[in-house]
Image (cartoon, rainbow, N blue to C red):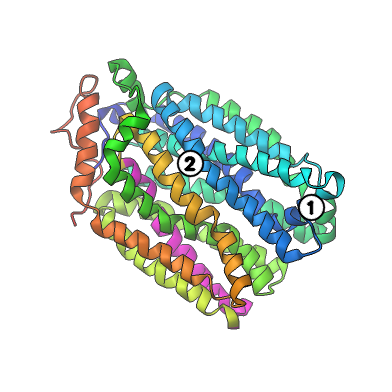
Amino acid sequence: MTSSTSTSTTVSATRRRRAFIGATAGHLIEWYDYGIYGFLAVFIGNAFFDATNPVTSLLSSFAVFALSFFIRPLGGIFFGPLADKIGRKRTLLIVLVLMAGSTFAIGLLPTHATVGMAAPVLLILVRCVQGFSAGGEIGTITSFIAEYAGPGRRGYSTSWLMVTAVLGLVLGGLVANGMIFVLGADTMAAGGWRIPFLVAGPLGLIAMYIRLKLEDSPEFQALQAAGETSKAPLREVFQWKRAMGIVFFVITLHSSIFYLVLTYASTFMAKSLGFDSGTTLLYVFLASVLSAAVMPFGGMFTDRFGRRNFLLVVGAAATGALYWFFAVASVATPATFIYPLLTVAILFGLYASSTYATMSELLPTRIRSTGIAIAYNIPVAVFGGSAPLIATWLIARTGDISSPWYFFVGTGIASLIALLVLRKSDFDRSAAASAHVLDANTQNIEGGVDRDHPMTTA
C-alpha cells in the first residue's frame, strides 16, 4: 500500500511526462558527475597522493571516495527537511548547482606534484561538497517522482530513477574508460583524467535549464495549499523509527551491490584479476546495461504483485551470487568471470528496481524527503561508498582476492532480515497518515488507503 492520492491521478499526462523527463535528465547528469571519480580512482590517486606506493595511493583515493559518502547523511539532514518545507523543485535546483560546480572544480585542481599536501586537502573539500549535494538529491527526487506516479505505477516510475543512475554511471564509465582505452594510461596520467570532470560544467547548465521548467509534485502542492507541510520534519520523522529502520536495512544490500557492479568491479577486474582495459570496459558496460534493462520489469512486477516477497527472493539469490562472484575470482579468466558478473548484475537490477518505491511507500508525504534522505544515505555511506575501500583493504590485508565476500554477503543477510520483519501494516500506516493530511484538498480517497499499488501480505 502507498500514500498516493487522487492528486496524482488528476495530473495531466503531459505534466507528468514533463516532470518525469526533466527530473531524470538532471538525475542522469548528477550521477555522471558523481560516478566518474570511481572510474578514475587510479589516476586520481597518483595525481593527488604520493605515487611512490601504488597500493597506498589507490587506498587513499578510495578513502576520499568513501569520505564523500559519509558527508551524504549531512546533506540529507540539510536538504531533506528543506524539500519537505519549501518544495521538491527548488531543492533539486540547489543540489544540482552544487554537484555540477564541484565536479567541474575537480578538473581544475592542482596536483600533489604542484602544491604538495594542499592537493589532497582541496580534493577532499570538493568531494565533500559533492557528497553533500548527493545526500540532498536522493530523498528529494525519489519523493518527487513517487508523488507524480500515476495509478499502479509507483514501482515502475521510481525504477527509472535507478535506471537513470546506472546510465549516468555508464556515461561516466564510457567517457573515463573510453579515454583510457583510446589515449592510453600515460596520457591519462599526464592530465587527460581532467577532461571528464570539466565536461560536467556544460552538462550542469543543460540540466539546470531543464529543472527550471518543472512544477512541484502534486502531493506537495496539496500539502502547501492545505497549510499542512511539516514545520519541523527532522523532529517529526523520528515518529517513524520502525519505517526508518526497515528502509536502512533494506538499502544495505542495495548499496553494496550497486557499487560493486558499477564502480569497484572495474578496479577489481583490472587490478586483482589482471584483465586488460578493453575487457574491463566491455564487461562493466554489459553488466551495467543489463542491470538497467531489467529494472522497469521488476518495478512493474511489484506494482502488480507486491514488493516484499519479490525483494526477499531476489535478495536471497543476490546474496548467493555475491559469494559466487568472489569465490571463483582466484581462478577466473575473462571467459569464465563473465557468468558470475552478469548474474550479480541482473539480480542487482531486479532488487534495486523496487527499493525506491518501497521506501517512498513506508514514509508519509509530509516527511518523505527527510525520511528517505536520512534512512537511505546512512547505509549508502557505510555499506556503499565504503565498499571499494573495504574490499581493497581486505585483499591487501589477507592477500586473498576472494576475501571481500565476507563484507558483501553480510550486507545481503542484513537486508533479508529487514524484509522478513516488514509487514503490510507498515505500508498501511504511511498511507493513512498521508491520506489524513491531504484529505482536505483531494477527493476519491477510499478509506485512506491507495488501491493503486498492492502490497503482498507477509
Spatial CA distance of label 2 from label 1 is 28 Å
Question: Label 2 crowding class (10 Å Cα cut-off): few <14, some 14-19, many 20+?
Answer: many
Foreground: 126 or 435?
126
The N terminus - image quarter: top left
Foreground: 189 or 394?
394
User: Label 2 belongs to which residue?
Assistant: 73
Count of marks placed on residues: 2
**Residue 226 % position (x, y):** 28, 17
- At x 22%, y 45%, the residue is 426
Q: Residue pushed farthest front?
A: 117
Stretch in magenta: 331-360
Query: Dot 1: what SS?
Result: helix
Question: Can residue 292 be seen here?
Answer: no
- At x 63%, y 63%, the residue is 266
**Residue 212 % position (x, y):** 54, 23
User: Label 1 belongs to which residue?
Assistant: 47
**Lower position in the chain sequence, tag 2 or tag 1:** 1
Does 144 sit above or below residue 50? above
Query: Which amino acid, mark 2?
Result: Pro
Does 367 sit above or below residue 314? above
In the rendered image, residue 440 lying in the magenta stretch gets the answer: no
Foreground: 44 or 137?
44
Question: Can residue 407 be seen here?
Answer: yes
**Residue 64 % position (x, y):** 64, 50
Q: Is most of the magenta stretch helix, strand or loop?
A: helix
Q: Relative to 339, is 194 on the left or the right?
A: right
In the rendered image, residue 355 lying in the magenta stretch gets the answer: yes
Query: Dot 2: what SS?
Result: helix
Q: Relative to 304, is 113 on the left or the right?
A: right
- At x 76%, y 50%, the residue is 48
Disc ID at residue 257: none
The quadrant holding residue 216 is top left
